[in-house]
Image: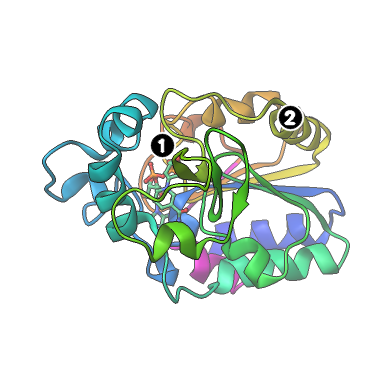
Amino acid sequence: MNHEIDTLREWIAGSDNIVFFGGAGVSTESGIPDFRSVDGLYHQQYRYPPETIISHSFFAANPEEFYRFYRDKLVVRGARPNRAHLRLAELEREGKLRAVITQNIDGLHQAAGSREVIELHGSTLRCYCERCGKRYPVETVNDSEGVPRCDCGGVIRPDVVLYEEGLDEQNLRKAIGYIREADVLIVGGTSLIVYPAAGLINYYRGNKLVLVNLSETPRDSEADLLVRGRIGEVFSQV
Ligand code: CNA
């Protein structure tokens, strides 16, 4: 891996237009399980598969069960940014990195100090009433029991994109713009199988596509540089 790290270090040193696109693997070193690793959420036992529970139709039909899973597994308590989040924030401060585009919903990039963060799938740190749109502090969802309700009687929900729901178009357009213009695109900690997010790398037009991941992805053969390793460890060396 040393040779790959040297190349990545050189590419980072030589660019002021780096874009990072990441997923759940960026936060596993902060103690938040991803979905598809062996100890990820998809390998744990529930009455329904996680992708069923966190779908729009399941939420509408079984909000109690949704919230049981959500509070137990998706709400992050006490997690701190790791070396990947921190180095990315530093690269932005140094004027080298333009944006972080993330599929994560944990807010750890902002906690690390990143400013330009595009949250494709929303954030567990915000919530609102489905009916009237009123915003509520995150504790309203995280620390209540059962299904949290608004003054208007509507269900309060986290501001995350559930399966079957569309991504915010403005966010998508912005992400595509950054990727299209990027000189170096670093893609890390994502299985690259959840669409439409995974399709974003198709917009990259450069010749420095870096994939940093613990396991294989379906796009490995397209990478100009493939780094197989833990992303926090990798970013602590570049
Ligand atoms: P995923 O499908 O679970 O894939 C994660 C990938 O990261 C896998 O290929 C792992 O091999 C890899 N990985 C795990 N740990 C590391 C590490 N330390 N270094 C490098 N690679 C690692 O997750 P995706 O993000 O691709 O899938 C998209 C889903 C997962 C999005 O909708 C997210 O909202 C959702 N998710 C988010 C969080 C979070 O916010 N932290 C947690 C769990 C799931």
The local secondary structure at tag 1 comes to loop
Q: Percent from the top left, x then y, of residue 99?
A: 76, 50
Q: Percent from the top left, x then y, of residue 194?
A: 44, 31
Q: Percent from the top left, x then y, of residue 91?
A: 77, 65
At label 2, which amino acid type do we have? Answer: Ile
- Count of marks overlaid on the render: 2
Which residue appears at 34% of the width and 34% of the height? Answer: 59
Residue 238: in sight, yes or no? Answer: no
Residue 176 disc label: 2
Closest to the observer: 78 or 102? 78
Residue 217 disc label: 1
171 is higher (above) or lower (below) than 159: above
At label 1, which amino acid type do we have? Answer: Thr
Quarter placement of the C terminus: bottom right
The local secondary structure at tag 2 comes to helix
Q: Does the magenta stretch include residue 85?
A: no
Which residue appears at 45% of the width and 51% of the height? Answer: 24
* Left or right position of 99 against 160: right
* Left or right position of 71 against 112: left
Which residue appears at 71% of the width and 34% of the height? Answer: 171
* Left or right position of 201 against 52: right
Residue 103 disc label: none
CB of residue at label 1: within 8 Å of ligand 1? yes
Magenta stretch: give its range: 225-238
Please rate how many residues cluster around mark 2, counting C-alpha atoms within 10 Å: few if below 14, some from 14 to 19, many from 20. some
Mark 2 → mark 1, Cα distance in angstroms:
21 Å
Q: Does the magenta stretch include residue 237?
A: yes
